[in-house]
Image (cartoon, helix red, strand yellow):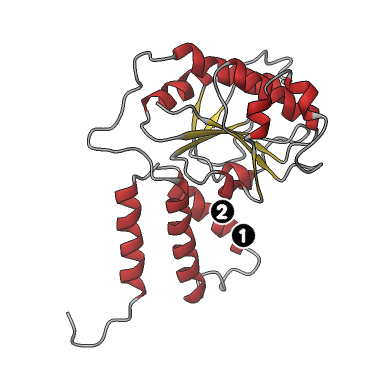
């Protein structure tokens, strides 16, 4: 069992990063990944707010993109209260923790910037949406509070009963393999002029394509098969050749 990574996307304040590190270590999480922190990294404000969780801060890694930050992870949850019209499985912290415990490979939980939360493009990288049930009349959680709730639930479940799994399914493929598949399909579609008939809609078409291939949580074997299909379709067949 591997503890999930915590991915902070474009965090704004060093003090909030430190508070998140404190919440993580309270419940045994140490893999902190930062995507384009606004004020750079390291940040002097993070240390005091971490209250001794220096090991988490010292091991924090910085990435330029959400996709890069998800490398090595086979299951990624994006925390938000808005689904932004993406078709995704929506789970509670309890369900996400059960999935993480049942998974043999590393997972990750993504949190958005303090003011705006995750954008649609960020959510499209994740396999599922994680929503924390809160008072509908006041649903405001700060960043560290959200991390604390999710980390607590993972820790609480400990080695409890695993979630139901698919028979003969070895778990979702590492995220970088899925990114490779999406890039291969995108390149082939671009070469074939797929995006040209709809000027200005290429970005929307790419987002829909990413949604189609991220949501099913394909295994590594399924991703390799799909890449083989893409390669097969890209070859021009010669007349009379079966």
Asked if residue 35 can be seen in this view, the reply is yes
Quadrant position of residue 139? top right
Looking at the rendered image, the quarter that the C terminus falls into is: bottom left
Residue 52: x %, y % from top left: 70, 19
Checking the image for residue 122, the label placed there is none
Q: Residue at x 26, y 86 (%)?
A: 238
Q: Residue at x 66, y 66 (%)?
A: 200
Marks 1/2 in contact by CB < 8 Å: the verdict is yes
Q: Position of residue 65 (x, y in %)?
A: 63, 50
Q: Secondary structure at mark 2?
A: helix
* Neighbour tally class for label 1: few under 14, some 14-19, many 20 plus, Cα within 10 Å: few
**Residue 108 vertical position relative to residue 242 in the rendered view, above or below:** above
The residue located at (27%, 38%) in the rendering is: 169
Which element is circle 1 on?
helix
Residue found at the very far bottom of the displayed protein: 239
Q: CA distance from mark 1 to mark 2?
A: 6 Å
Q: Please tell me the numbered disc located at residue 203.
A: 1
Percent across and percent down for residue 101 are 40, 23
Q: Which residue is mark 2?
A: 207
Question: Which is nearer the eye, 40 or 70?
Answer: 40
Residue 94 locus on image (x, y percent): 49, 17
Label 2: few (<14), some (14–19) or many (≥20) C-alpha neighbours in 10 Å: some
Identify the residue at horizontal 33%, vertical 56% (top origin): 224
Q: Is residue 95 above or below residue 14?
A: above
Q: Horizontal placement of 28 versus 167: left or right?
A: right
Residue 157 relative to residue 33: left or right = left
Q: How many numbered marks are there?
A: 2
Side (left or right) of 74 relative to 65 = left
């Amino acid at each position: 069992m591997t503890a999930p990574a915590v991915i902070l996307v474009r965090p704004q304040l060093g003090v909030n990063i430190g508070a998140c590190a404190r919440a993580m270590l309270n419940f045994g999480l140490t893999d902190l990944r930062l995507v384009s922190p606004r004020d750079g990294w390291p940040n002097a404000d993070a240390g005091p707010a971490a209250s001794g969780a220096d090991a988490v801060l010292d091991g924090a890694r910085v990435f330029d993109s959400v996709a890069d930050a998800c490398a090595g992870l086979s299951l990624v949850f994006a925390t938000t209260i808005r689904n932004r019209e993406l078709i995704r499985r929506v789970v509670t912290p309890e369900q996400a923790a059960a999935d993480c415990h049942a998974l043999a490979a590393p997972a990750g939980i993504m949190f958005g910037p303090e003011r705006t939360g995750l954008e649609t493009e960020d959510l499209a990288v994740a396999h599922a949406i994680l929503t924390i049930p809160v008072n509908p009349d006041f649903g405001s959680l700060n960043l560290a509070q959200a991390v604390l709730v999710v980390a607590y639930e993972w820790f609480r479940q400990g080695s409890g009963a695993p979630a139901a799994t698919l028979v003969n399914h070895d778990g979702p493929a590492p995220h970088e393999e899925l990114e490779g598949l999406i890039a291969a399909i995108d390149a082939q579609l671009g070469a074939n002029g797929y995006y040209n008939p709809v000027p200005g809609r290429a970005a929307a078409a790419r987002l829909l394509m990413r949604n189609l291939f991220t949501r099913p949580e394909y295994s590594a074997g399924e991703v390799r098969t799909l890449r083989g299909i893409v390669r097969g379709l890209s070859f021009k067949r010669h007349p009379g050749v079966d």
